[in-house]
Amino acid sequence: MSVGPNICEDRGIVRQQSELRRILLERVRVGSSGLEPGASVYEVELKFSLASSMIEPRLVALSARFREAVDQVDRYFSHPCRDFSKTDEALRLRKVGGHVAITWKGPRIDTATKTRREIELDLLPLPSTTSGAGGSGAVTIQQWTELLESLGFRRVLEVAKRRRPVRVTWQGTEVEVALDSVAGLGEFVELEILAQQGEVPLAMACLESLARELGCHSPERRSYLELLLQASVAR
């Protein structure tokens, strides 16, 4: 007896879901971070140009957990010895309130998503000597900017956005959803999973499935930085 294509597809989805659940349980065993210490971390991401009002009802239907919106400032830098636009890398300082982190993003590893290796380090807050806007976060990002510029790095652009983080469980794994309003660009939706190298294909499949469920089509592979730089050239 032959097996129809729909049945084969369903069985494939079931296998993917089972493997994702196995990985999730293994992450719980390893530790609260969900990733093995010292392992390379990949940011598996799909982004869509879409108003949050179009997707929020579908997230609610999936019992998503919404958190308070936050203001983020991302300050990007160029390297003194290599062209990040050619190597497809990025170096960023991100400020969220009093918290600052430095992030390196490696080149994208596929042509469909924004999946790339990522290293992110939280920076110790520096004490603020004034009561100005931004508090210690403003002091920390400025001091680190001065350090990087002293080493030959140069500021390229700042990306300012208001982000509402959302978390939803899909196919047995936790997916981070970001509802973004980006200054100069408009509204976007990001779907993200942090994965180890061997988990990347499964994470991609999970995000693509969730995107279909949410009605998201035509992913945007360019970063906010790239979109803003292209917009400034076009003006």
Image (spheres, helix red, strand yellow):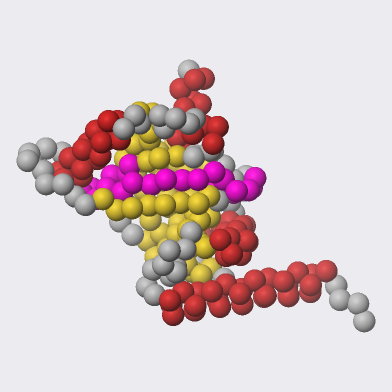
**Is residue 94 located in the magenta-colored stretch of the structure?**
yes
**Left or right: where does residue 205 sit relative to residue 23?**
right
167, 115: nearer the viewer: 115
Q: Is residue 25 above or below residue 222?
A: below
The span picked out in magenta is 93-114
Q: Which of 148 and 173 is in front in this view?
A: 148
Place of residue 205 in the rendered image (x, y in percent of width and height, measured from the top left): 63, 61
Identify the residue shown where x is 45% and y is 34%.
225
| Residue 61 within the magenta-colored segment of the rendering | no
Q: In this view, does 200 lie above or below 91?
A: below
Q: Residue at x 43, y 76 (%)?
A: 30
Q: Which residue is drawn at 50% across and 51% down?
A: 117
217 lies left or right of 94: right
Residue drawn 48% across and 31% down?
82
Q: Which residue lies furthest to the top in this view?
A: 235
Q: Quadrant of the N terminus?
A: bottom right
Q: In this view, does 47 lie above or below 186?
A: below
State whether the magenta stretch is mostly helix, strand or loop. Answer: strand
Q: Going by the picture, which residue comes out furthest to the right?
A: 1
Looking at the image, residue 213 sits to the left or right of residue 64; the answer is right
Q: Position of residue 157 (x, y in %)?
A: 37, 30
Query: Is residue 50 visible in the rendered structure shown here?
Result: no
